[in-house]
Every structure is written in C-alpha cells, then in structure tokens.
Image (cartoon, rainbow, N blue to C red):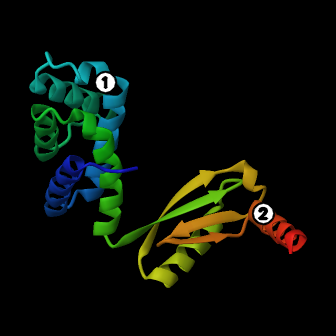
C-alpha cells in the first residue's frame, strides 16, 4: 500500500505528541478505533454539511460508549484538525502508517508469521527470541492463519523470509523436478 504525504505528516505530528505524553501505544489504539468508526459511518463523516466539531463529538461519544472514558484533549484536537482540514478520507492510511511508524520509533520490528494453525505461547517465544537475537530489536508479531501451508510457518521480518512450511517444501521440490525435466 502506498501512503500519501498528507497521511504521513499527520502521523508524524501525532507521534511527536504521543512520544511527549508517553502515549504512543494508546494513540495507536485510539486511531485504530477511529478508523473503524470512520469506515462504519463514512457517509456521515464524509458529509460536507456536517461540521468538524459535530464529527469530533460523535467520535468522543463513541469512545465514552465503548471505553467508558474520553480520549485526552491532545488526541481529540488531532481528530478535530483532521476533520477541519477535510482529511478524513486519509484516516485509514493514517492508522496503518501510524502502526508501522510507532513500531519503528519504539525500536521494535514487525514480524509477519503465517501458520496453518494458531501458534502456542512457547512457539511465539521461540520466534521472539530468534528475531531479537538476529536483529537486536524487540519483535512485534503479527500472526496470520493460512491453512494452505499444511504445517510449519512462513516468517518475514527485516526484508527476510524464512519458509519452513510443508507447502514451501513441496513447491521447492516441484521446482527442482521441473528443472531436472527441462535439463
């Protein structure tokens, strides 16, 4: 996914505020929640007749309904500025970009793990330890279930891919057999 310059500027601003207030992770959760609300009620939020303050109020009320608390003033100001500048269509991009930028700013690394079945806590610990030893950063594991792998896992991080799945091995064997037949 290509991120817009506009989304990246808003994310940078929110990260700076989040870092100063020690709320980087919390703002990530908040932004994810706002993205979900925005996508669910896009017609309302994209309506130019609805004032930015009304849109922000709806977000605030949704927070109070779900979290039983309101986000802090800094986050609400951020959301209000997004609406005032008519940048609401960038909220999904902001949320995705924020997630990756926050991981980077906290000196962590994203690790995508595809498995045929959910990993156990022990398996996650083994992957965490391996990645941390390999790159020297704390891993943030994003697990995806892909039953077509049959068994094993595909682990991606720092531009590397480690495929220890049955499907991966079968594909490798198939390529070798095809190559031998052609040769």
Q: Out of 105 and 7, give the one closest to the viewer.
A: 7
The structure residue drawn at horizontal position 25% and vertical position 50%, both measured from the top left corner, is 27
The structure residue drawn at horizontal position 10% and vertical position 35%, both measured from the top left corner, is 85
Seen as rendered, the residue at the extreme top is 49
Mark 1 lies on residue? 42
Between tags 1 and 2, which lies in front? 2
Position of 121 relative to 88 (above/below): below
Position of 37 relative to 148 (above/below): above
Position of 15 relative to 155 (above/below): above
Q: Out of 130 and 92, give the one closest to the viewer.
A: 92
Q: Residues within 10 Å of mark 2 (few under 14, many from 20)?
A: few
The structure residue drawn at horizontal position 19% and vertical position 57%, both measured from the top left corner, is 12
134 sits to left or right of 1:
right
Image quarter hosting the C terminus: bottom right
**How far apart in space, not on screen, are marks 1 and 2 (Cα)?**
43 Å
What element does badge 2 sit on? helix
What element does badge 1 sit on? helix
Quarter occupied by residue 84: top left
Seen as rendered, the residue at the extreme right is 181
Mark 2 lies on residue? 171
| Residue 109 locus on image (x, y percent) | 42, 69
7 sits to left or right of 119:
left
User: Which numbered disc covers residue 122?
Assistant: none
The structure residue drawn at horizontal position 38% and vertical position 70%, both measured from the top left corner, is 108
| Residue 171 locus on image (x, y percent) | 78, 63
| Residue 145 locus on image (x, y percent) | 64, 50
Mark 1 or mark 2: name the one nearer the start of the chain. 1
């Amino acid at each position: 996914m290509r991120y817009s310059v506009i989304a990246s500027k808003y994310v940078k601003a929110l990260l700076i505020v989040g870092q100063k207030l020690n709320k980087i992770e919390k703002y990530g959760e908040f932004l994810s929640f706002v993205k979900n609300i925005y996508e669910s009620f896009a017609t309302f939020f994209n309506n130019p007749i609805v004032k930015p303050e009304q849109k922000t109020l709806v977000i605030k009320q949704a927070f109070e309904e779900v979290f039983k608390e309101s986000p802090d003033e800094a986050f609400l100001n951020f959301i209000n500025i997004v609406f005032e500048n008519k940048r609401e269509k960038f909220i999904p991009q902001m949320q995705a970009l924020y997630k990756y930028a926050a991981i980077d700013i906290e000196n962590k690394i994203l690790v995508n793990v595809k498995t045929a079945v959910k990993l156990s806590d022990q398996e996650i610990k083994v992957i965490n330890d391996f990645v941390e030893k390999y790159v020297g950063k704390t891993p943030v594991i994003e697990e995806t279930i892909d039953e077509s792998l049959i068994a094993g896992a595909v682990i991606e991080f720092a531009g590397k891919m480690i495929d220890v799945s049955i499907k991966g091995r079968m594909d490798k064997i198939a390529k070798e057999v095809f190559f031998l037949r052609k040769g």
